[in-house]
Image: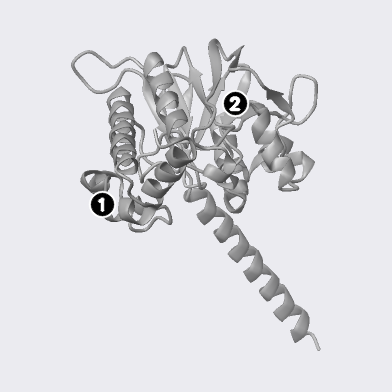
Amino acid sequence: MRLAPRIFRVAWVGFALFGACAAAEAQRSIETFHVQGNVHMLVGAGANVAVQVGEEGVLVVDTGSAASREALLAAVRELADGRPIRWIVNTSADRDHTGGNETISQAGMTVNGNPAAIISHENVLARMTAEDRPVTELPLNTFFEAGRDFYFNGEAVFLHHVPNAHTDGDLFVYFRGSDVLVAGDLFVTTQYPVIDLAAGGGIDGFIDGLNMMLDIAVPAYLQEGGTYVIPGHGRVGDEADIVSARDMLFIVRARVADLIAQGKTLEQTIDARPALDYDTRYGNPSSDWTSEDFVSAIYQDLQARGGR
């Protein structure tokens, strides 16, 4: 008669310990790296997350996937060291960049006592609203201009909108004092860039966006470094990495345009493998975005605009 409660208590303790271990393991899966200045990069939450920490509080750029939101919050709080989360910036509407919006926002507080404000371009809000996302996940602080800037934690923060690149709502962030760019999926080091045509993306916008970053980035003299760039996925880069990505896009675009001018079909263009010499650098067998997908997106984008 008295055995059952004891078994129940042991089972309850076991489940509690299992839950605590699982939570601890999830938190360990988020790795934190100091980039420079006030800015840190958090890896393991889906997309890369940037966190700026200073006396005024915390600014978070992108919030990873929904599955990692609690682990990400724990990692942000560890960096914050008691400082409030004031701002969240979304670089696109992609779920691996916005999945933790609600959790991170509700854990933060503006100076007015509201949950941390979520900022993005108005096209991001439109796409997230069309997906019927909860209002607590939405970036209700939006802009429609080419950019927005404000001062936080002792440095100027610039948000630059890049139309029709990865999507139609992309933006990148520049922390001027720290000299760090946060690129979102406008720049990745793990695969070919994703051109989401259905979401308003385009090859020329992508090239323009990287050129905008190159107008800002400055290399260290005769060495790597200078302005650092946090990509949407992958390792931290610098100006040379952006140049390489921009040149690859420009060259593959030119090759596809030439094949279109020759009257090649999409299938013939893919078979010609115009990105072949870049496959060892940007091809990723484990990704669901292949070299063929990349070439196909460029072809369809150019074809829809007359092939040039």
Left or right: 234 in relation to 95 = left
Q: Residues within 10 Å of mark 2 (few under 14, many from 20)?
A: many
Q: Residue at x 28, y 34 (%)?
A: 251
Q: Quadrant of the C terminus?
A: top left
Residue 177 position in % (x across, y down): 46, 12
Q: Please state which amino acid type lies under the numbered disc 2.
A: Leu
Q: Residue at x 77, y 79 (%)?
A: 5
Q: Residues within 10 Å of mark 1 (few under 14, many from 20)?
A: some
Residue 147 position in % (x across, y down): 59, 17
Q: Residue at x 40, y 37 (%)?
A: 307
As rendered, which of 16 and 190 lies closer to the eye?
A: 190
| Vertical position of residue 59 compared to residue 263: above or below | above
In whole angstroms, how far apart are the C-alphas of marks 1 and 2? 46 Å
Q: Is residue 290 visible?
A: no
Which mark, by number, is residue 193? Answer: none
- Asked which secondary structure carries label 2, the reply is strand
Q: Quadrant of the N terminus?
A: bottom right
| Vertical position of residue 133 compared to residue 16: above or below | above
As rendered, which of 205 and 99 lies closer to the eye?
A: 205
Q: Which residue is mark 2?
A: 59
Q: Which residue is mark 1?
A: 272
Residue 144 position in % (x across, y down): 66, 21
| Vertical position of residue 79 compared to residue 289: above or below | above
| Vertical position of residue 2 compared to residue 204: above or below | below
> Which of label 1 and label 2 is nearer to you?
1
Residue 302 position in % (x across, y down): 43, 38
Disc 1 or 2, which lies upstream in sequence? 2
- Asked which secondary structure carries label 1, the reply is helix
As rendered, which of 292 and 289 lies closer to the eye?
A: 292
